[in-house]
Amino acid sequence: FPVPDVLIHCTTARSAKIWPFDYWEYVVNHISNLGLTVGLIGSPPKLQSDFYNSGSSEEVLLKKTSLIDLRGKTSLIELAGACKLARAVISVDAGPLHIAASSTTPTLAVVGNDSSGTGASPVRLWLPRSSNVTRTVSTFNCDKCSTNRFKNDNCLVDNHPCMVSVSPDQVISWLNKVF
């Protein structure tokens, strides 16, 4: 398949690391308005829904935007090749982030961690340390996940403030630097 300009990955096994889907919609529309194509990567749709906390949100996102559905269409090696051919990759803290990090493609990790690294993901341990990887910075400080040793599936605070506090404008600012 022709590789889209930007690849995104929205879901993960711990729902505490999910970025709001209306934020994804805003970013996808921004990228599309620039005349660029955007592809949604991940496991096949049923697996995304059942195991990676997408519910029906990815289906809604596909209907509301010009996203190209690539879920379940690549092996890991093919995904690595697609990441290398894309102009940018944006992903929550999940496997595709790490695959993208292994390429030279600019990659943004959408994580709900503040400037010191405290937040929804164990970035001190797991954030790829490749020069092509940048991460978001949440304006909300919360240590509930780390105190719980990241064993929680769901957010431990009402309204998921660590992820909600990562604005779509932060992602768009990064994209503006990339393009």
Image (cartoon, rainbow, N blue to C red):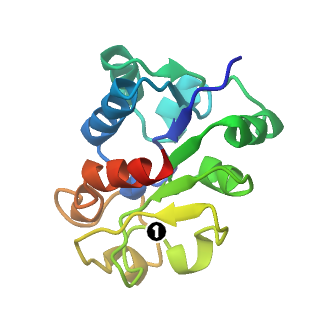
Identify the residue at the far right of this view. Answer: 77
Residue located 68% across and 19% down the image: 2
Image quadrant of residue 27?
Answer: top left
Residue located 46% across and 68% down the image: 121
Answer with left or right where residue 23 lies relative to residue 152: left
Residue indicated by mark 1 = 121
Please determine whether, in this image, residue 5 is positioned above or below residue 173.
above
User: Considering the image in quadrants, where does the N terminus appear?
Assistant: top right
Looking at this view, is 154 or 80 the one in front? 80
Please determine whether, in this image, residue 49 is positioned above or below residue 154.
above
Q: What secondary structure is marked by label 1?
A: loop
Residue located 58% across and 69% down the image: 127
Query: Local crowd at mark 1 within 10 Å, few (<14), some, or many (≥20)?
Result: many
Residue located 33% across and 21% down the image: 60
Answer with left or right where residue 102 lies relative to residue 114: right
Residue 85 in the image: state x and y as whole percent.
Answer: 71, 36
Answer with left or right where residue 67 lies relative to residue 169: right
Residue 159 in the image: state x and y as whole percent.
Answer: 17, 56
Looking at this view, is 34 or 11 the one in front? 34
Please determine whether, in this image, residue 82 is positioned above or below residue 17.
above
Q: How many marks?
A: 1
Image quadrant of residue 146?
Answer: bottom left
Looking at this view, is 11 or 145 the one in front? 11
Residue kind at label 1, given as amino acid type: Ser
Residue 82 in the image: state x and y as whole percent.
Answer: 71, 34
Residue 126 in the image: state x and y as whole percent.
Answer: 60, 71
Looking at this view, is 152 or 171 the one in front? 171
